[in-house]
């Protein structure tokens, strides 16, 4: 489950206008107390159904893949007294569900009052019901706004599939990560941004033995030490722990990237410790210029050296088995 299918969240006034305009049309088809009953039923149904549909359109966060759950925790800000992340979303959703149920209760309460009364009294009760329906809907105006903003943020997350094997590429800027991803995949057409970084995440795909592997370059996350990441970025790195099946740490032994080799290797060592349960391979990039480090693979994309060897090493490290249908 990703968040790309989340529908637009309506605003409180949009819902009220929709409910009352439909109610007016329904009332014109009848007369007397019956018209008031039809208007009330229509308005109550529209508000109750639409408010509850806002809630049911969101996934059950207990069932969402941990990668996407942790990303939501990372990117959703606090709103007023409501906490950030998934807990905050649950609070907003609970409030909207309450309003939807209240709209249904108000509809039912006033329908009973409309039975057996004359048209004038029925109109009075219906107006009272409309006022209460509007008040309940406006009471969750801020919750609807917060959910709408969260939805817009979540839909911008990169399309990364937790059910497909993922090779995450790490290393300081300018060490050749995007050059490699572009060279072996169609990643030029697959870029997106995390809302908390200023650079684009590159996601490319390589197929081996009918298995599609994601190659993910995450600038702004795994390109500097943990101590230099802000809280949101550290949370996003936690999300990557659920996703990554292998980490490739690119190290420019020539230091032409602008970072000393010792600094790059220190980042590698930190990632080895952080991703202790995941294979971490050291890749010496720009190997046609320098290769004075111990590495699992020596790579020079410009010279076509080590490209296939690196892909083979990554696939072997992931050790992913395709699940085939049971054959009896």
Image (cartoon, helix red, strand yellow):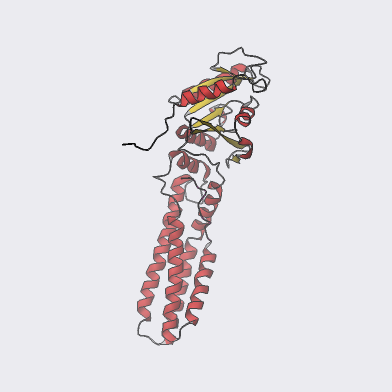
Q: Is residue 277 visible?
A: yes
Q: Report the residue that reaches farthest toward the front.
A: 328
166 versus 10 height, above or below: above
Q: Is residue 128 visible?
A: no
Q: Is residue 167 left or right of residue 305?
A: left
In the foreground, 163 or 107: 163
At 65% from the left and 14% from the top, the residue drawn is 290
Q: Is residue 232 left or right of residue 261?
A: left
Q: Is residue 237 left or right of residue 125?
A: right
- Decide whether residue 304 is among the magenta residues: no
- Decide whether residue 8 is among the magenta residues: yes
Residue span colored magenta:
1-10
At 53% from the left and 17% from the top, the residue drawn is 296
| Snapshot quadrant of residue 163 | top left
The quadrant of the picture occupied by the C terminus is top left
Horizontal and vertical percent for residue 118? 40, 87
At 44% from the left and 59% from the top, the residue drawn is 53
231 versus 311 height, above or below: below
In the foreground, 189 or 51: 189
In the foreground, 267 or 278: 278
Q: Report the residue that reaches farthest toward the left.
A: 328
Horizontal and vertical percent for residue 154? 53, 47
Give the main secondary structure of the magenta stretch.
loop
Q: Report the residue that reaches farthest toward the top.
A: 292
Q: How many marks?
A: 0
300 versus 57 height, above or below: above
Horizontal and vertical percent for residue 129? 43, 74
């Amino acid at each position: 489950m990703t968040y790309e299918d989340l529908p637009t969240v309506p605003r409180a006034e949009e819902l009220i206008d929709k409910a009352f305009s439909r109610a007016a049309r329904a009332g014109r088809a009848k007369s007397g107390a019956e018209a008031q009953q039809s208007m009330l039923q229509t308005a109550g149904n529209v508000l109750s159904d639409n408010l509850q549909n806002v809630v049911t359109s969101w996934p059950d966060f207990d069932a969402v893949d941990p990668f996407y759950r942790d990303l939501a925790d990372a990117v959703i800000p606090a709103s007023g007294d409501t906490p950030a992340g998934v807990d905050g979303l649950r609070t907003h959703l609970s409030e909207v569900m309450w309003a939807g149920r209240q709209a249904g209760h108000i509809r039912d309460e006033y329908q009973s009052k409309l039975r057996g009364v004359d048209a004038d009294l029925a109109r009075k009760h219906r107006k009272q019901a409309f006022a209460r329906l509007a008040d309940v809907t406006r009471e969750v105006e801020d919750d609807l706004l917060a959910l709408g903003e969260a939805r817009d943020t979540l839909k911008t997350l990169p399309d990364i599939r937790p059910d497909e094997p993922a090779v995450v590429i790490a290393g300081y800027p300018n060490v050749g990560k995007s050059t490699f991803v572009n060279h072996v995949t169609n990643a030029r057409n697959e870029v997106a941004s995390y809302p908390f970084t200023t650079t684009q995440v590159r996601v490319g795909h390589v197929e081996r033995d009918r298995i599609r592997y994601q190659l993910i370059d995450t600038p702004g996350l795994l390109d500097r030490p943990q101590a230099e990441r802000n809280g949101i970025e550290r949370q996003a790195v936690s999300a990557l722990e659920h996703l990554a099946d292998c980490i490739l740490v690119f190290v420019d032994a020539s230091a032409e990237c602008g970072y000393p080799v010792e600094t790059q290797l220190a980042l590698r060592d930190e990632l080895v410790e952080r991703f202790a349960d995941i294979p971490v391979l050291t890749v010496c990039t720009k190997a046609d210029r320098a290769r004075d480090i111990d590495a699992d693979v020596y790579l020079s994309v410009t010279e076509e050296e080590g490209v296939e060897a690196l892909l083979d090493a990554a696939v072997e490290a992931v050790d992913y088995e395709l699940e085939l249908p049971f054959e009896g």
